[in-house]
Image (tube, rainbow, N blue to C red):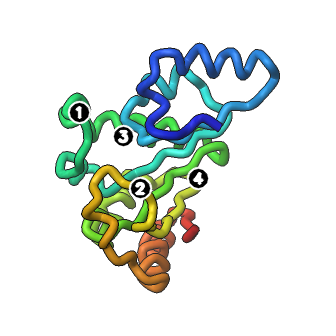
């Protein structure tokens, strides 16, 4: 598994994946999805893409300026890679209040139709974060997570709460 920070920012990732595969091992990448060309070059055996919110709201997030322009297109391309991988890929959405709402989930339905696996994850304010203000955010209750999941399921998208 290759994760931690954002692995696609490292120039040697493609070579590393090739070396791992040459040993007969499988490669799993956990990513934010903002470098779809790197993902395509790495050809992971399993891919997990973390989607933070609806694609139209990404410009409101604290992401590097180099990704602000064309962010939607980059994420759409990564989502299409996930779709092409079928059961060997997943989309994860961490339900952070103030970042993800039911409306965002509804917007994502159109983008994620055709993805084999979608998971809604509970936001954990007790983990280190780039913005310390989120450490005081109260997570959604389980009922809200289940409701978000049901929005996807009602749209024909397989979804589970983790």
Q: Residue at x 25, y 33 (%)?
A: 67
> How far apart are the two marked residues, 3 and 1, measured between alpha carbons?
10 Å
Q: Is residue 157 above or below residue 63?
A: below
Mark 4 or mark 1: whose residue is earlier in sequence: 1
Work out whether residue 141 or residue 33 is closer to the camera in this orientation and state it. Answer: 141
Identify residue for label 4. 116
Q: Is residue 37 visible?
A: yes
Nearer to the camera, 31 or 3: 3
Labels 3, 2: front one:
2
Q: Which residue is mark 2?
A: 128
Determine the residue positioned at 34% across, 66% down: 135
Q: Residues within 10 Å of mark 4 (few under 14, many from 20)?
A: some
Choose mark 4 or mark 1, whichever is in front: 1
Is 16 situated above or below 107? above
Q: CA distance from mark 3 to mark 4?
A: 15 Å
Circle 4 or circle 2, nearest the eye: 2
Against 67, is 113 above or below?
Answer: below
Circles 3 and 2: CB atoms closer than 8 Å: no
Mark 4 touching mark 2, by CB under 8 A?
no
Task: Using the rendered view, name the quadrant where residue 110 is placed.
Answer: bottom left
| Residue at the disc numbered 1 | 70
Q: Is residue 106 visible?
A: no
Q: Earlier in the sequence, mark 4 or mark 2?
A: 4
Label 3: which secondary element: helix
Q: Tell me the number on the disc at residue 76.
A: 3
- x then y, percent, for residue 153: 50, 71
């Amino acid at each position: 598994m290759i994760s931690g920070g954002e692995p696609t920012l490292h120039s040697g990732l493609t070579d590393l994946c090739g070396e791992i595969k040459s040993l007969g091992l499988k490669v799993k990448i956990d990513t934010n999805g903002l470098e779809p060309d790197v993902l395509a070059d790495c050809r992971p055996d399993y891919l997990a893409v973390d989607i933070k919110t609806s694609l139209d709201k990404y410009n409101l997030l604290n992401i590097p300026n180099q990704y602000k322009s064309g962010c939607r297109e980059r994420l759409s391309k990564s989502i299409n890679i996930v779709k092409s991988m079928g059961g060997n890929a997943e989309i994860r959405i961490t339900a952070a209040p103030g970042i993800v709402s039911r409306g965002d989930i509804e917007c994502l339905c159109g983008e994620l139709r055709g993805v084999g696996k979608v998971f809604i994850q509970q936001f954990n304010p007790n983990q280190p974060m780039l913005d310390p203000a989120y450490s005081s955010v109260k997570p959604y209750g389980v009922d809200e997570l289940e409701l978000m999941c049901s929005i996807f399921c009602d749209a024909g998208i397989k979804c589970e709460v983790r």
